[in-house]
Image (spheres, rainbow, N blue to C red):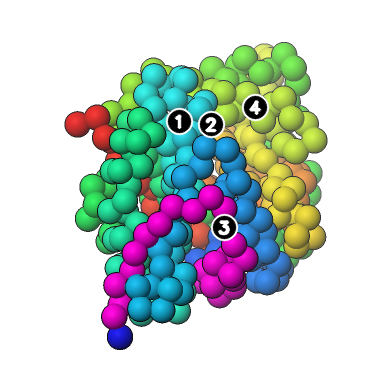
Amino acid sequence: MDQRVFVREVPALDAALLDALLSQYPYDDHRRHRRIEPAKALAYLRERVERAASRPGTVRLVAEERATGQPAGLMLVQSIPEDSALLGLSMAGIPFLLARPDHPAPRRIYRALLDSLPFVVQREGLDHVSTRIDTADIAAYQELTDSGFRLVETLVSMAYDTERRGSGTIDPAVFGFDGVVRPVEAADVDAVAALAATSFTLNRYHLDEDIPKKDAGELMARWARSYCLDRDNCDVWIAEAAGGKMAGFLGTQLNRDLERHTSILVSGRALLAVADQRGRVGQMLSRAHTWMSRGDYKEADTQLNNYGMIKAAFNLDMDMVRTKYTFHRSFLR
Ligand SMILES: CC(C)(COP(=O)(O)OP(=O)(O)OC[C@H]1O[C@@H](n2cnc3c(N)ncnc32)[C@H](O)[C@@H]1OP(=O)(O)O)[C@@H](O)C(=O)NCCC(=O)NCCS
């Protein structure tokens, strides 16, 4: 059969396309969380795709089989206004790059979609495009690298199942810490932001030579600050030493949309930083997160080469549940 695909831009996504791409989607973020029902997790994923596709300004490219007209793939491209304003570049992302799970030649689909990207970039005036994929999606990996995307990050996510592993109250003395672990207060916010700005230097912004480093720190500071200001949906733990100095923080966000679909609450996207490394404060705050943050699962994500963070998570019996690649492509060169 003719396996070629063609790509067209659509004003909206239809249900048949989403059924074909998502009903058996093999790379869902929550497929290793044993208490999350796969069908419900996929309903959540579908909502995310629909929401991204309906955001004004989003470019929706659909791949179709030439022979049958059947849907074969989808790529959404959208600008990231906050990053663009801060970094002085026109930053965009591909929030979803999907190929039909039963298609025999997914690379062909990704290739066709990615071949259309330079046209979109030129028309929309974009400078920089990022995307993130599951590491199991080897076809996407191969076509992204082939089409000029560069790997900037490999993320490892670990999860703590509260029901299975238990909860408790932290005792700082157990970690040799003379001080307390407590929830964030308004007076901590500037110190949290300052520590975030200088601590997170292993991430995709810092590792991309096309992005200014100073502003990359400010991005992380804003991220940490946003957690401190949203008490309903975030937990932020502060390690405060006996003299009152902040020794570290851990902030995390509750996934309310996933909870609405699955009745399971995941506390994730955690940010953890300590003032003086290797003093067991990171281990202590990770224990605070797993025991005292709200949620059925507590997640920690980090770079594959962040040995300290991975060790702290493994020490707490967290399970490795997800690995992802992040890619950047600059169109300024
Ligand atoms: C990652 C981080 C939070 C760890 O906190 P920490 O207080 O330095 O770590 P701890 O002293 O509690 O160590 C925890 C475990 O990791 C090990 N470890 C810590 N740093 C390590 C490193 N660089 N390499 C290898 N092992 C390391 C420790 O030996 C300990 O294991 P053990 O108890 O079996 O000996 C800290 O290094 C940090 O702030 N890094 C910058 C920000 C960051 O990368 N955050 C994580 C991603 S959000």
10 Å crowding of disc 2: few (<14), some (14-19), many (20+): many
Disc 2 under 8 Å from ligand 1? The reply is yes
**CB atoms at circles 1 and 4 under 8 Å apart?**
no
- Between label 3 and label 4, give the one nearer the viewer: 3
Looking at marks 3 and 4 on the same chain, the residue that comes earlier in the sequence is marked by: 3
In the picture, measured across the screen, residue 104 lies left or right of residue 267, that is left
283 or 272, nearer to the observer: 272
Q: Residue at x 52, y 26 (%)?
A: 82
Q: Residue sitting at 39 percent across and 52 percent down?
A: 325
What residue is pinned by disc 2? 273
Q: CA distance from mark 2 to mark 1?
A: 8 Å
Amino acid type shown at disc 1: Phe
Across and down, in percent, residue 330 comes to 28, 35
Task: Find out whether the residues at labels 2 and 3 contact each other: C-beta distance under 8 Å.
Answer: no
- Name the mark on residue 200: 1
Q: Judge the density around disc 1: few (<14), some (14-19), many (≥20) Cα neighbours within 10 Å.
A: some
Residue to which mark 4 is pinned: 226
* Position of residue 299 in the picture relative to residue 7 (left or right): right
> First in sequence: mark 2 or mark 1?
1
Residue kind at label 4, given as amino acid type: Ser
Going from the N terminus, do you reach mark 1 or mark 3 first? 3
Ligand 1: does it lie within 8 Å of the C-beta at label 1?
yes
User: Which dot marks residue 13?
Assistant: 3
Q: Nearer the viewer, mark 1 or mark 4?
A: 4
Q: Is mark 3 within 8 Å of ligand 1?
A: no
